[in-house]
Image (cartoon, helix red, strand yellow):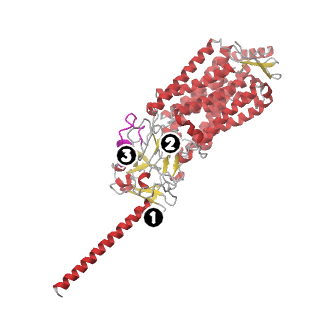
Amino acid sequence: MSTKSISHSAQLAKRRLLKAAVTGGAALWAGQGYKLFAAAKPDEQPVTSAVRWGLLVNVSQCGDGCDDCVTACQAENGWGSGSSDEQQSNALQVAQWMRKLDVHNPLDGSTFSLPLMCQHCDSAPCVDVCPTGASFKRADGIVLVDRHTCIGCRYCMMACPYKARSFVHEPLFDQRAHQPRGKGCVESCTLCAHRVDKGKQPACVEACPHGAMVFGDVNDPNSEISQQLAKVSSRELRKNLGLNAGVRYAGIPVV
Amino acid sequence: MLGCVMPVFPLFSMKGFTQQRMVYQELSDHHGAYTLAMLICAALTVAGGVVAYYMHHRGHVITGMDNHIVWGLPHVVAVFLIVSASGALNVASISSVFGKNNYAPWARLSVLLAAALLLGGLAIILLDLGRPDRLIVALTHYNFKSVFTWNILLYSGFIAVCLLYLMALLTPNWQTHSSKAGWLAFIWRLLLTTGTGLIFGVLLARNAYFPWLIVPAFIAASLSFGLALFLLVLLWVQRSTARVVPVTVLSRLTRLNAKLALIALVSVLLHHGVNMLVEENRSFARLVLWPNSWISVWFWLGQVLVGTALPCWLFLKSTANARNTTLGAITIVLGGLAMMVVLIIGGQAVPMPVVDGFSIVNSSFQDGTVLSYWPKLAEWLLSVGGVGLVLFLALLGMRVLPILPQRIKPMPNVVKRNADVDAISKS
């Protein structure tokens, strides 16, 4: 085989390789783009019940002493360390959209750690008890508070089985544009609805260094969360209340 | 100066009173006690209003409430006043519904006090809202799945029913309708207390409240607390305006109040007892019944000893007299407040089993610990302001409407019988 033909073959191989790389890359990009497009939603388009957003927290992967998810939530939504507000409120008066709990296992004496936030229940007690309808559930399962109609009666806080709601005890000035908060109103984890609607992950999920949190559409059998839920044993907290929470926990020992 | 005197109530069958048409009149303003009482109540109401405005400006940071104890002293007092509104109607119901005419002279006062109590309780709840300026939102946006919404309707309806009832009692031509209005008020008051109990009963997340037992407890408690408050007002009227409340009437009312206080305690004990049998509710019942927490101190010392045992002893040991009745009624009121503290504050202070089956050992939010609560000045003033408003409205009502019976003279034979009863009790 002449040098020319070898060179030609090599060029062909290079071209094929380049073609394969470009095609593969394009396919990968298109796939990723498709996934993003599927999750992203134009602002004028209402959310749909075809989707139900859920969160799976794998407790066995959750780092002991790590609270990166909480810090990320604070920074994203402008509460706690993410804001210069709430300086006059005491430790139990400041907002607690999300918190880490160290839990004791009575069987073997071991402890494990988990993040606790609004569980975005399907049959949300906070929604049921709100007298003005300010607490509401979006069609895609995200439970929110309409700050314009919340009268600050705190009945939803009484009804929440996870103490996941906070009442703003003082005037606020340092707020995020996408997350308005206000004195005298109740608030809680929004599952970063503003990010989810743009096809992004909630801030806590993105920030978790241990990959302990999986977010996605539980109605889609091909989503990662659905596949994880099918694969690992998980549970909802306070299952006896029959709330069908959108947040599930894997790795909690059976007692 | 006396206001208009209206002959409105025939008392042909009344025991203990002259057989004549009952005459009612407004409170005259020459009583120093009245003016002083009005000034005190107005001052308390203004203080409550000012602190509510300040709280609206600064936020609830000035209170002792937080994200655990979200309902504090204002709610304790407000719920107490609201359920008492139902009980304050006892005397009117006994008269209009059960046809006991001995109590008819005081029916108007009973209805007026009931309406005033409810308004006072509602004022506290309204002014304690995070956004009291959004009252219009509460009145225009309804979620009919919420017990709160139903209670807004029940409370508004109760005021309307009380006004209707009062009009029926006040208007000579409407006398024949007073019994119907009495029945309506009687049914409505039971609905009101049921609705108020259900505010807590539907909170399945809270293991302090057993839905179908807290309602009867609230109904029984309301009858007791409201009657005690009515007795206190009645005694003030007796003392300040030289009216005579027959001893027989007072004795029956105090005995009834003692029995109602006992029934309220039994209902509450039943509630906690059943909670002890339910695995997930046991932690709260244990905190109430076992003497190892501040909650149990409020229960045993407050509701059981001061709120039930003491008034029962005072009310049942002898014929009623002003001193014992005043003391007994005050202890029932204190016991009622203690019951509300146990149920409302205690129910929030008990750790919530957010991770069921496990105990929480560490949390930035103090999950897993029995919390404490002590109200700050703002809550005290707001609550006392609500009580001031109740009394202000009641006094104002007595001043502008012919609520009080004119001086009632007991019949000679009743005077003799009362004297005999007193002699027996002394011996």
Whole-angstrom CA distance, mark 2 to mark 3, is 22 Å
The reply, left or right, for residue B311 in relation to residue B283 is: right
The reply to whether label 3 and label 1 mark residues of one chain is yes
Q: Which mark is residue A148?
A: 2
B350, A117: nearer the viewer:
A117
**One can see residue B93 in this view:** yes
Say few, some or many: other residues with alpha carbon within 10 Å of mark 2 (under 14 / 14 to 19 / 20 or more): few
What's drawn in magenta, residue-wise? A72-95
* Residue position for label 1: A230
Q: Which mark is residue B201?
A: none
Q: Secondary structure at mark 1?
A: helix
Say few, some or many: other residues with alpha carbon within 10 Å of mark 3 (under 14 / 14 to 19 / 20 or more): many
What is the three-letter code of the residue carrying label 3? Gln
Q: Secondary structure at mark 2?
A: loop
Tell me which residue sits at (71%, 25%) in the image: B108
Q: Chain of mark 2?
A: A
The reply, left or right, for residue B317 in relation to residue B134 is: right
